[in-house]
Image (spheres, rainbow, N blue to C red):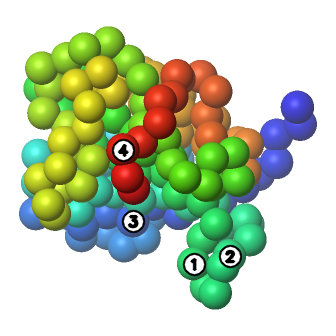
Amino acid sequence: MARANYTLEIYLQSEVEDALPMFARTREEVDSAVDRLTAAAAGFNHNPAMHVAERPKWDDMPDHELRLDIDPEAGMAALRYFGPDDPAGQVTLGEPSSARLYRDIDSATEFPTNAAITLDHLRAAVHEFRESGGRRPRCVEWQEADGW
């Protein structure tokens, strides 16, 4: 598969940093963004959201999204995705973990305990999300989401 140079838009609101949006167009910029997200994770005000700028929109809203939470102390993260590969939404499928990961930080709704993936898997999934133009990353496993 040829890799296009897609632009990843990353929206972050945290107590540590309020940089809306961040843009990543290269592997190095994606790595830097993931590092910033990990450093800011303890103070997230909302789940960071990612979109590929070049994808279609529905009434100015992206037709896809990758959201995440990170527990840097546990070295774990979890993702939720919706888009052309699964409009109903899915969350990552990993090993059972005691990491506290929130599907929705605002309502304190947690991810399933088996949604945790390593930070290396998180980084790989974010790279694949950008490089595929916003498709659901295949480098991690997925399970049905219980509501968006």
Instruction: Label 4: state its secondary structure.
Output: loop
Reading the chain from its start, which is encountered first: label 3 or label 1? 3
First in sequence: mark 3 vs mark 2: 3
Whether residues under marks 3 and 2 lie with C-beta atoms below 8 angstroms apart, the answer is no
Q: Quadrant of residue 39?
A: top left
| Disc 1/disc 2 C-alpha distance (Å) | 5 Å
Name the residue beneath numbered marker 3.
11
Mark 2 lies on residue? 57
The amino acid pointed to by label 4 is: Asp
- Which residue is identified by label 1? 61
Name the residue at the top extreme: 95
Q: Is residue 85 visible?
A: yes
Residue 97 in the figure: left or right of residue 85: left
Q: Residues within 10 Å of mark 4 (few under 14, many from 20)?
A: few
Q: Tell me where residue 43 appears, x and y as whole percent.
A: 11, 54
Tags 4 and 3 in contact by the CB under 8 Å rule?
Answer: no
The secondary element bearing badge 1 is classed as strand
Question: Which residue reaches farthest right?
Answer: 2
Q: Secondary structure at mark 2?
A: strand
Q: Position of residue 99 (x, y in %)?
A: 15, 26
Mark toward the viewer: 3 or 1? 1
Q: Nearer the viewer, residue 97 or 130?
A: 97
Graded by Cα atoms within 10 Å as few (under 14), some (14 to 19) or many (20 or more), the crowding at tag 1 reads few
What residue is shown with label 4?
146
Question: Relative to residue 72, is residue 51 depicted above or below?
Answer: below
Q: Is residue 42 above or below residue 138?
A: below
In terms of image quadrants, where is residue 79? top left
